[in-house]
Image (cartoon, coloured by chain):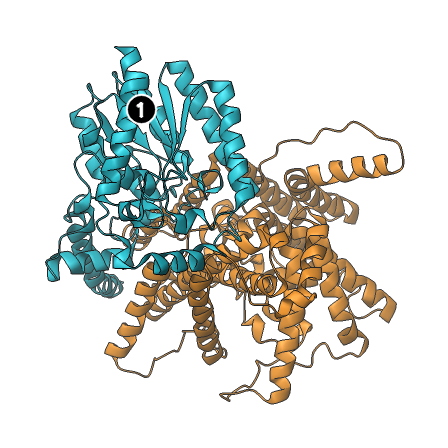
Chain colours: A cyan, B orange
């Protein structure tokens, strides 16, 4: 019996050592974007007036440093409305000075898939924001930074410890804005348009699921209703995208997206700004088909600053 | 508590150490520990239903004792009936109440006499179909005087609630498992090592094969109206491996865990997808349930010792009841009936026992004829799985009609097609390992046993890594819902 127990320990021991080592190393990687935003909020709890929400379009698009209202960018890659709703629920209570929500409403927003329990993003929301959504109870992946995404983390570990390369998360500044540096990999206009057509012509085939629309509309309703109840002003924005994206969307779905937001607007009285086809944004302003780069982000943030300060901030002070 | 959870990873070593290192000198205390551990294991899910299990245990223990002291046939029958009513009554209420109410309401409406009915929000207690069948087998065997009723309440309770097989089988017989609770347990090193290996293989089947397949099977079945025939065909193949990996994986973990505590459970799966006809499939799939129905339903109905028309009737009854056992839905009944239809030609030509041994015994590759027979059997099984997995009958028919349309020749299209390729490769690897080990109790039982320690350990470590690395999104065991 003792021999058996010793053999089992002997078998498990190397696995445990490796597992602990990988876990410790992963936990010592530079902070991820979720952690950075959380830290900023914790340090500025009493003075934050606006939170910026949405997907990567807003993460890279809205730079709080160009907005006169004290803001934090809580948008993140592939963040569904379910999590925007969670943040609003959480921070209307926890941020005493919160006045505005800048909410992204992109072409895809209504049909975005909810996160699954498998999602590493769900793990990070849970870890940094005590968000108990989409997390498997008692799954080992709930407690392990490494196991939540082993293949990605192996690359991160290799890049950081062996290649001595800085983490991609380092492009995220202290207020949660992420710099997407570059401009279509230096490709020409024709090449960009061609790759956009190739990517998006059939991209939407399996995308528009009514069940997702129903779910996301419900989150929008709850967001608007909660903000109205708490006296928080909502500014809804559709971020700019390049022609190589906007030319290949489904127009019928775009019309639906517009009519849905107009209906909500009539009911809940918020401001909506649509930059989807805005020609102030040129090819040089984009990192890729639907994300702004540094200069594009500055341009967009300054426009939004005008919106916030002129239309809202001015009326409040 | 799930086998593939952190809770169980802590629970199992604690119970193991207490069992072998603290209470090893006292059989009664060991049995008491098994009962306590089993109640914790079950109560982890929902403690309220522990009372149900305890009640069932007390009733069947008492019926057993009373049967021993009762000689009159009428009184004995009455006692047996009490046990059947209590057990089937629980099962009927928790599992089938809403089904019958809804169908009666629909039937009355159909004949123009709508009635008001009230469906109840009933939670199905996990494993109720398994432990009620297990205790029923005890009272029936005592009634038939096949076994002596036990005096030992602790041993009987442990037999009813033994945690490794409590919620999803194998459905044990008292004649096999109960005596094991009477005898002093001696730790057997090689048995324990073998148990661990079987647990490892079960976890691989569940976490890597079943959980990965589940993601695609669920996605395809849930969105079947938007997909082409080839995608739906792929969906049912994923489901076939999901349900096999899930259920046989659970059985492997259950059997392996029992071996760690010195118990031998019956085999539940014997490489069913290598069957050459449907009779062989049913001798290899969910063996503990198939033999239960054979012994307690088919044979009492006359079995195969009656005229052919009655044999056909008996076969249909067994398969339809077996389908209904799986769930209160017409899809399961059709699935059962379909299997009975598959069985008919074998019954009529008396060829249902043609394939007793495992295919290509002692050989590496099967005969061409066997290969074709295996493919045909697998295909008709796939067809039946569509009904098993579909939401309702019309969903199943829509699914089938799309598979049998021209779109089956189109390229499969759904989100995550690259990941599905990885899963298909894993399935292929899994089939190869299963084929290689098909003459053993489980596929890796003797795999690389003749190789040196380094090679063997590398294989075990690789399995552990694959489980962590390529494990799918954690899903509950399918058979919990039955």
Residue lying furthest left = A164
Relative placement, left or right, of B51 versus A198 is right
Structural crowding at the residue carrying mark 1, measured as other residues with C-alpha within 10 Å and reported as few (<14), some (14–19) or many (≥20)? some
Relative placement, left or right, of A33 versus A225 is left
Q: Label 1 marks which chain's residue?
A: A
Mark 1 element type: helix
Q: Residue at x 29, y 76 (%)?
A: B456
In this picture, is B374 found above or below B418? below
- For the residue pair A312 and B56, the one nearer the viewer reads as A312
Judging by the rendered image, the residue that carries numbered circle 1 is A307
Q: Residue at x 52, y 31 (%)?
A: A260
The x and y percentages for residue B111 are 89, 37
The x and y percentages for residue A205 are 53, 53
Is residue B184 among the parts visible in the rendering? no
Name the quadrant containing residue B423.
bottom left
In this picture, is B157 found above or below A307? below
- Number of callouts: 1
The x and y percentages for residue A297 are 25, 39
Q: Residue at x 63, y 67 (%)?
A: B408
Name the quadrant containing residue A306.
top left
- For the residue pair B412 and A249, the one nearer the viewer reads as A249
Quadrant of the frame with the N terminus of chain B: top left
The x and y percentages for residue A246 are 43, 46
């Amino acid at each position: 019996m003792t021999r058996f127990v010793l053999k089992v320990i002997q078998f498990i021991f190397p696995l445990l050592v490796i597992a602990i080592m990988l876990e410790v190393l992963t936990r010592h990687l530079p902070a991820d974007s979720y952690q950075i935003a959380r830290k900023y909020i914790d340090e500025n709890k009493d003075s934050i007036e606006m939170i910026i929400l949405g997907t990567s379009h807003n993460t890279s698009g809205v730079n709080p440093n160009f907005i006169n209202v004290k803001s934090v960018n809580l948008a993140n890659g592939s963040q569904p409305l379910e999590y925007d709703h969670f943040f609003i629920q959480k921070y209307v209570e926890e941020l005493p000075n919160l006045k505005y929500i800048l909410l992204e409403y992109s072409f895809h927003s209504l049909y975005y898939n909810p996160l699954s329990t498998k999602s590493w993003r769900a793990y990070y929301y849970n870890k940094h924001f005590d968000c108990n959504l989409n997390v498997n109870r008692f799954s080992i992946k709930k407690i392990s930074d490494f196991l939540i995404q082993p293949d990605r983390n192996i690359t991160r570990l290799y890049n950081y410890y062996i290649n001595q390369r800085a983490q991609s998360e380092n492009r995220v500044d202290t207020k949660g804005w992420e710099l997407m540096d570059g401009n279509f990999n230096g490709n020409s206009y024709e090449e960009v348009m061609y790759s956009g057509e190739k990517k998006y012509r059939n991209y939407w085939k399996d995308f528009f699921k009514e069940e997702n629309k129903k779910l996301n509309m419900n989150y929008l309703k709850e967001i608007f209703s909660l903000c109205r109840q708490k006296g928080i002003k909502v500014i809804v924005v559709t971020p700019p995208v390049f022609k190589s994206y906007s030319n290949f969307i489904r127009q019928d779905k775009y019309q639906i997206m517009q009519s849905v937001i107009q209906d909500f607007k009539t009911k809940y009285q918020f401001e909506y700004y649509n930059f989807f086809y805005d020609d102030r944004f040129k090819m040089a302003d984009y990192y890729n088909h639907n994300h702004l780069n540094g200069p594009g982000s500055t341009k967009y943030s300054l426009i939004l600053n005008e919106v916030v300060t002129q239309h809202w901030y001015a009326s409040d002070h | 508590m799930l086998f593939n959870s952190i809770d169980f990873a802590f629970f199992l070593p604690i119970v193991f150490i207490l069992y072998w290192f603290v209470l090893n000198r006292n059989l009664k205390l060991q049995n008491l520990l098994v009962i306590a551990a089993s109640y914790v294991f079950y109560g982890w899910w929902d403690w309220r239903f522990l009372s149900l299990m305890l009640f069932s245990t007390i009733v069947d223990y008492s019926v057993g004792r009373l049967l021993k002291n009762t000689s009159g046939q009428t009184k004995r029958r009455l006692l047996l009936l009490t046990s059947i009513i209590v057990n089937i009554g629980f099962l009927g209420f928790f599992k089938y109440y809403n089904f019958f109410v809804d169908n009666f309401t629909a039937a009355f409406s159909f004949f123009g006499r709508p009635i008001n009915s009230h469906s109840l929000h009933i939670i199905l207690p996990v494993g109720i179909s398994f432990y009620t069948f297990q205790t029923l087998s005890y009272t029936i065997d005592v009634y038939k005087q096949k076994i002596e009723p036990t005096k030992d309440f602790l041993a009987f309770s442990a037999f009813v609630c033994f945690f490794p097989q409590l919620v999803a089988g194998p459905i044990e017989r008292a004649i096999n498992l109960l005596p094991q609770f009477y005898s002093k347990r001696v730790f057997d090193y090689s048995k324990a090592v073998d148990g661990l290996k079987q647990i490892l293989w079960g976890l691989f089947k569940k976490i890597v094969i079943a959980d990965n397949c589940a993601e695609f099977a669920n996605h395809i079945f849930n969105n079947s109206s938007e997909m082409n025939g080839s995608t739906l065909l792929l969906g049912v193949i994923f489901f076939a491996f999901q349900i096999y990996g899930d259920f046989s994986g659970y059985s492997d973990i259950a059997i392996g865990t029992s071996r760690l505590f010195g118990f031998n459970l019956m085999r539940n799966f014997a490489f069913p997808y290598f069957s050459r006809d449907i009779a062989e499939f049913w001798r290899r799939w969910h063996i503990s349930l198939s033999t239960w129905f054979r012994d307690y339903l088919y044979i009492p109905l006359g079995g195969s010792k009656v005229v052919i028309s009655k044999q056909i009737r008996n076969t249909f009854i067994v398969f339809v009841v077996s389908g209904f056992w799986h769930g209160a839905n017409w899809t399961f009944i059709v699935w059962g009936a379909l299997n009975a239809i598959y069985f008919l030609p074998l019954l009529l030509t008396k060829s249902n026992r043609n394939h007793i041994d495992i295919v290509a015994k002692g050989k590496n590759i099967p005969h061409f004829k066997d290969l074709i027979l295996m493919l045909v059997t697998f295909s008709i099984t796939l067809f039946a799985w569509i009904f098993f997995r579909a939401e309702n009958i019309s969903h199943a028919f829509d699914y089938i009609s799309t598979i049998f349309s021209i779109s089956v020749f189109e390229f499969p299209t759904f989100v995550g097609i690259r990941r599905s390729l990885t899963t298909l490769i894993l399935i292929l690897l899994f089939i190869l390992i299963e084929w290689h080990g098909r003459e053993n109790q489980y596929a890796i039982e003797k795999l690389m046993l003749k190789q040196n320690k380094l090679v063997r350990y590398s294989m075990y470590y690789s399995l552990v890594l694959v489980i962590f690395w390529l494990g799918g999104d954690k899903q509950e065991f399918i058979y919990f819902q039955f």
